[in-house]
Image: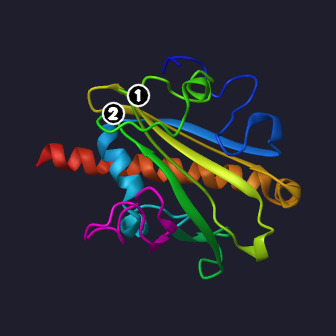
Amino acid sequence: MSETAAWPPANGLTTKIVPRKDAILTIAYSTAVHAPASLVFDTLLRAKDYRAWNTWVPVAEIQSPGNDLDSTSQERMSIGCSMEFHVIMNADKPNDITKTQLKVVDISTPSAPTSYLTPELLEDPSFTADLSKVYRVSWTGNGGMYGFAPKLERFHEVIVTGENECEVRTWEIMTGMLSRVVKLVMEDTLKGKVALWCEDLKRYCEKQHSGGAAA
């Protein structure tokens, strides 16, 4: 898919684990960022630093390492790692935390592309097909609520659009019985929180980049 194509596509988004036809709740957001794609993606993966920029999820704990078993495995996401997000749904009650269990299923970069998405899936306009221009991470739900949590998958794409310029796209799709309850009760709130996540990321990375350039 061309990075200049309209996104999200008119027929809706899809993921590998939750296909379009099963989607009950879909939340998506995109924004342009005036910072290198590699910096933005590195910020997304550095779970230990979420407190510095992420007001929706100020704590992201890596509870078990994935395939990357080096000394930073508890600080940075890797494929297969299990995470616990401490989510603040009400900014007026910052101590009221919802703990969410997640598992990273894919990390793809221009220098180390993966085959998690099949060629057929990459043809879907949900995704950026040119693997030389996209950094991508996705995670899924990993239990919780006695196994009755909604089935979900969330993607982040950081797409190179120019020198020190990129576009961030994120989308999450839920299905299953409880996703209907989430949609009814929390859809608008979640849409606002996903937008907040992306705008927090944008502000932080642009500040980091401009500070580094000045130095």
Task: Name the residue nearer the viewer: 36 or 1.
Answer: 1
Determine the residue positioned at 46% across, 73% down.
64
Quick one: label 2, few (<14), some, or many (20+) residues within 10 Å? some
Label 2 sits on what residue type? Answer: Pro
Does dot 2 land on a helix, a strand or a loop? loop
**Residue 112, x across and y down, in percent:** 32, 39
Does dot 1 land on a helix, a strand or a loop? loop
List the residue tagged with mark 2.
110
Label 1 sits on what residue type? Answer: Leu
| N-terminal label among 2 and 1 | 2
Side of 116 relative to 23 (left or right): left
Provide the residue span drawn in magenta. 58-82
Q: In the rendered view, would you say 186 is above or below 172?
A: below
- Type of secondary structure dominating the magenta stretch: loop
- The span from disc 2 to disc 1 (Cα, nearest Å) is 6 Å
List the residue tagged with mark 1.
131
**Residue 90, x across and y down, in percent:** 68, 70
